[in-house]
Amino acid sequence: MTRASQILLATHLLALAGAYGFTKIRIPSDTSPETKATPVRSKSSSRERPLIAGDGPLLMAGFLKEQKEGKSKYEELKATLRVAEDLKGACVAAIAGLSGGEGHPDRTPDEWAARIAEFEVRVLHWMKQNPEEAMDFLGTDPACAESELLHVLQEHVFIEVAKDNGVLRSMPWLTKHHATLSILASVTVDEMKAGGGLALFTRIEEALVGSAREKACRDLFLDQPGYLSSVGEATPFGDREKLLELAGKQPDAARKCALLAGFGRSSERAATWLLEWVGRGDLEGDLANQIKGNLGDAVLAIPSMDLEKRVEARRATEGNEVKPRESIINELVGGDVTNLLEKGRDWRYEFRHGRASLDDIQSAVRGEVPIPPEAEEAVLVTLYRHLSEEDPARALPLLEGVSEERRRAALFEFTWTNHGDVEPDTFLRFLADVPEPVTAQEIDFRTKGWNWKARGFLARYGDDYVEWVQQMPPGIDKDTAMNSLVWATREQNPAKARELNDRLYSKKP
């Protein structure tokens, strides 16, 4: 986010903070359709509660969405601002217009954003004609250095010019300043993916050898495992033998592993080939285990890969060495179902509004996710975990096909690992299907569920949540919810926790 956007966001935060103070939540007894506001469509990865008047977080999300979807001042000005005859002079004038900073008393956030945009576009015009000359000036100008204006240019200008001209042609100016080295790295990876392949990476390295910025480039990205992992992931399958050769030249195991494991994450073919290659025993044991361990996380996102290969890779990750095969398969298939629900068609939304049935969703899952017989229960439990956040009662039949032991374990586990971004009454409806706790672990899970929820509900609703808890029907959940309120408040303010305790547990006269 640009500095201009940060200032603009701050002003809206102040306005929304007032609106947020009026947020209300529904009490459990309020179940009439008339009182329920129209839900906002959402993907499961960004769960949105029904829109209630004064819902600050949703208003903020809407504002950010508008900012993202609308044209930025930079884009608007780029389309309308004429190129000056004196490129340098126009740039100097734009920098002068930023004097006094964003906190200048006579400058509104919109004016500041407009001045930042003018600076960006003036630099863009100059760099399109003579990028090296522009960078020589920007890198030595005291005003730019004092205000760190080179970092302002990273988001739009530098990356746009580098992409237009290509990374190889842009290297002379990209290597002039540390603020542009990250652009060099990211554009290189993008061009590798677009067809440049491993040969492009090699040419970049060769061009840097002996240059004044070679050490800085190596320190900041070329020799960093994170960057090498991105290079490996951008390497096409046809360059696999060249990648092995490049990995062999790396000075340590961390960099070798980064290149190869990154390649393994690039596709199913790459992961399968790399596992077979590692399995031949050509690598020393520690490096082979590191690569397999990295691939163990990668295969979570490759449902089409051979199941036994996926299990083999997952077993190499820390903590999975002695895990039963069934548990690993459950994890893999459960992850596949979750990915389908979160990244594909918005089944959760459709289920919430009655537009999709359990049969519809199960058919879609079974049509797109390979499910071995031993993972049937994992599919049902995973679907229930997601869909119970939308409509607990309608999702419950999913657990009819699950053994009683596993059904009970799932229900108690989800009291604290799930339902983190739902309304309190939805959580309470879910708990209606959870049996009375019997074991110490079940009691702990149910208590932990209310404790974790209390933190979020208090932050979201404030005193309205306290009132909601006071109006809950008598029983174990009300007792636990009241205890959790005191527990969560005590973390931040012990004195207020004592007041809350007296309020909730008022003594009889």
Image (tube, rainbow, N blue to C red):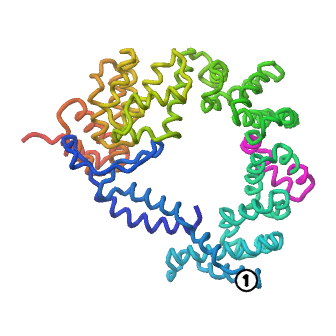
Indicate left or right for 464 with 261 as reference: left
Name of the residue lying farthest toward the left: 509
Q: Name the residue under label 1.
A: 84
* Residue 156: percent from left, percent from top: 66, 64
Task: Tell me the quarter of the picture where residue 322 sits.
Answer: top right
* Residue 430: percent from left, percent from top: 31, 32
Can residue 299 be seen by looking at this rendering? yes
Q: Residue at x 62, y 73 (%)?
A: 117
Indicate left or right for 506 with 400 as reference: left
* Residue 173: percent from left, percent from top: 82, 64
Query: Callout 1 environment at 10 Å: few (<14), some (14 to 19), or many (20+)?
Result: few
Q: Nearer the viewer, residue 244 or 368?
A: 368
In the image, what residue type sits under mark 1?
Ala
Can residue 452 be seen by looking at this rendering? no
Indicate left or right for 184 with 338 as reference: right
Secondary structure at badge 1 equals loop
- In the rendered view, tell whether residue 11 sits above or below residue 380: below
Q: Which residue is drawn at 30% across and 41% down?
A: 424
Q: Which of 283 and 353 is in front in this view?
A: 353
- In the rendered view, tell whether residue 481 sits above or below residue 64: above
Q: Does the magenta stretch include residue 222?
A: yes
Q: Residue at x 49, y 40 (%)?
A: 345
Q: What stretch is highlighted in magenta?
A: 204-231
* Residue 324: percent from left, percent from top: 56, 14
Q: Residue at x 50, y 33 (%)?
A: 338
Looking at the rendered image, the quarter that the C terminus falls into is top left
Q: Is residue 416 magenta?
A: no
Looking at the rendered image, the quarter that the N terminus falls into is bottom right
Kindly report the secondary structure that dominates the magenta region of the rendered protein. helix
- In the rendered view, tell whether residue 294 sits above or below residue 496: above
